[in-house]
Amino acid sequence: MHYVSVEGLTKSYGINPLFNNISFHINEGEKIALIARNGIGKSTMLRIIAGQEVADAGKVYVNKGVTVALFEQDPKFDENRTVLENIFTSNHPIMSVMRKYEAALEADDAEAITDCIEKIDELGAWDYEAKVHQILSKLNIHHLQNKVNSLSGGQRKRVALAKTLIDIGFEHQHTLLMMDEPTNHLDVGMIEWLEHYLGQESITLLLVTHDRYFLDAVCTEIWELERENMYTYKGDYENYMEKKAARIESELASIDKAKNQYRKELEWMRKQPKARSTKSRSRQDNFYEVEARAKQKIEDAQVQLQVKMSRIGGKVLEVKKVYKSFGDLPILKGFDYTFSKGERIGVIGKNGVGKSTFLNILQGLEKPDTGKINVGETIIFGNFSQQGLKIKENLRVIEYVKTFAENFPLADGSSLNAAQFLELFLFTPDKQYTYLNSLSGGEKKRLQLLTILFTNPNFLILDEPTNDLDLPTLAVLEGFLNDFQGCVLIVSHDRYFMDRLVDHLFVFEGNGEVRDFPGNYTQYRIEEREKEKRGSSLNLQPEPVAKPVEQATKPVEKQTKKLSFKEKQEFEKIEKDIAKLEEEKVTIAEQMSNSNLPFEEIKKFSDRLIAIDNELGMKEFRWLELSEGA
């Protein structure tokens, strides 16, 4: 089934073309990754397909039976309404009772809970309720009665993601889900859950992401926007890199051939008299086509990081018996470590366990409760923080850079002026005179990286550096960090990025405990899974619930608790439902063994088996959750 057809799509901003005369189709069940450099038009294309923006030329056809859902990087809410009201916006009977049910659970109103349970039974909506509960719990969304305008940026992103996933699982059988960087502001556990969720669900997906493990786990096809065109690649990210390299090599060979032909044709044109005969007109026309091909430029421009590093002495950084707490929430309990030259350390842990606070303490931006931080005399920190660019006024890009310095030393001993340095980071002369507030999120991140590197740091602290950076820039940043002779401390939810760079990990396990793990993230996860199989999990503390209005001063409650009245009923019902689904699965398998069945019946049974497997997976997952308190 065709979901979307796009023909001759063209879009420019001023004199800068984003894409020109591109056409494509999206069919049911396809999972496509859309990639491009920052500022090329990925987000713009999603908004055009969703009908939120108008193209300069071309047409977008959306099948009348298809609903387009767009999850954006900067979600929009009704700011004066609660989290609950923003998530459950439909007035459909099932959505209404879900809204009342979640509100009753939060208020612990037994009478209202009982009324909602009866209505959910009447509507046969327990499957939907289980999915809603799974989404809210996995994305750590609590305090549903808080106003959206009191939430942090990360909380807003998770609420928007929950709303999108709940909506597409509710009303529409045929939905094209478009997601713009959904993994930003999610911790690794949430990202892995979302991978599994999108992989299991029968979803048609168009995804913009910089997370290469997430891309490979979810998508089977990659589309790249480049030089105003669209290129399509089947398979994973590694296959895309190989096929792209082959395509560029082929294009360069074609241009070389055209150049040779152009030289011959140019010589012929110059020899022709001014009054040319009509017989040679076709060759004249062909000359201009050859000229255009010969003068093509295949620009595979990349950010160039050649910044000089300040000398690093014998003493780097010593952390001695550091304690830090916020109220009753411990962040560090006697943390003790001596950093060595050239170390590359990853910092992982759930959101809210204090990773960013730890980085600030190392740099002297926050004080520990007790303990000492001894920084070597030659150490210059380069701090890439989540706060982004620090802008006092809306300057042009080149004016902003000149507030730091006019000239910048490079690793080879030479120096560049501000304009030349900006060009190394793919800021063209036109873009250098753009105002800061007109830059895309990725361009702002690239500019932030530039301003940090030309201070010549020898101890880089990178707090979520991959958010909003495009894949080509990430690849170059990885190469630069691999060659960097100083220390690197990285907080990132990008598992691929971590695996490429770090030698060991500081694992923030909660309750102030930090473990030094000797390996990268994938090695850590393998060990964790082995422990889970042996029944000896690490017993990590749950992520502290973010309270936008009240300070989190109460101690974290224990995870295990007795089931409520409603949960006991749900637990019993799920057991019966699982048994029924297993029986139906056996019955269908027996019927399909009949070789005389018509094709239509076989397809019908096959579709039902897939649906049963999906439903069983969801119910078994919920059964396991509830069984802990049974």
Image (cartoon, grey):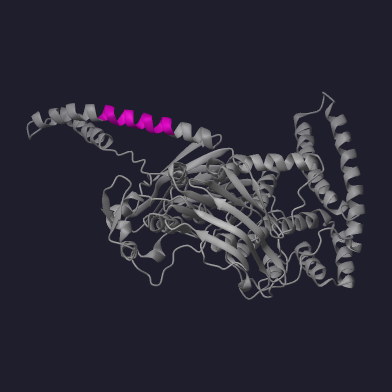
Magenta includes 254? yes
Q: In the depicted view, which residue is nearer to us: 123 or 458? A: 458
Q: In the image, residue 59 lies at what x, y percent?
A: 47, 50
In the rendered structure, which segment of residues is drawn in magenta?
A: 245-258
Residue at the spot x=83%, y=29% of the render? Answer: 592
Q: In the depicted view, which residue is nearer to us: 288 or 177? A: 177
- Seen as rendered, the residue at the extreme front is 314
Total marks placed: 0
Asked if residue 566 lies left or right of residue 450, the reply is right
Quadrant of residue 81 in the image? bottom right
Residue at the spot x=82%, y=67% of the render? Answer: 105
Asked if residue 66 lies left or right of residue 20, the reply is right
Q: In the image, residue 498 lies at what x, y percent?
A: 56, 45
Q: In this view, does 55 lie above or below 247?
A: below
Q: In the image, residue 395 lies at what x, y percent?
A: 35, 68
Kindly tell me whether residue 74 is visible in this rendering.
no
Kindly tell me whether residue 579 is visible in this rendering.
yes
Q: In the image, residue 418 lies at what x, y percent?
A: 29, 57
Magenta includes 385? no
For the stretch drawn in magenta, the main secondary structure is: helix
Q: In the depicted view, which residue is nearer to us: 573 or 356? A: 356
Q: In which quarter of the image is the C terminus?
A: bottom right
Q: In the depicted view, which residue is nearer to us: 511 or 253? A: 511
- Seen as rendered, the residue at the extreme top is 595
Residue at the spot x=89%, y=48% of the render? Answer: 577
Q: In which quarter of the image is the N terminus?
A: top right
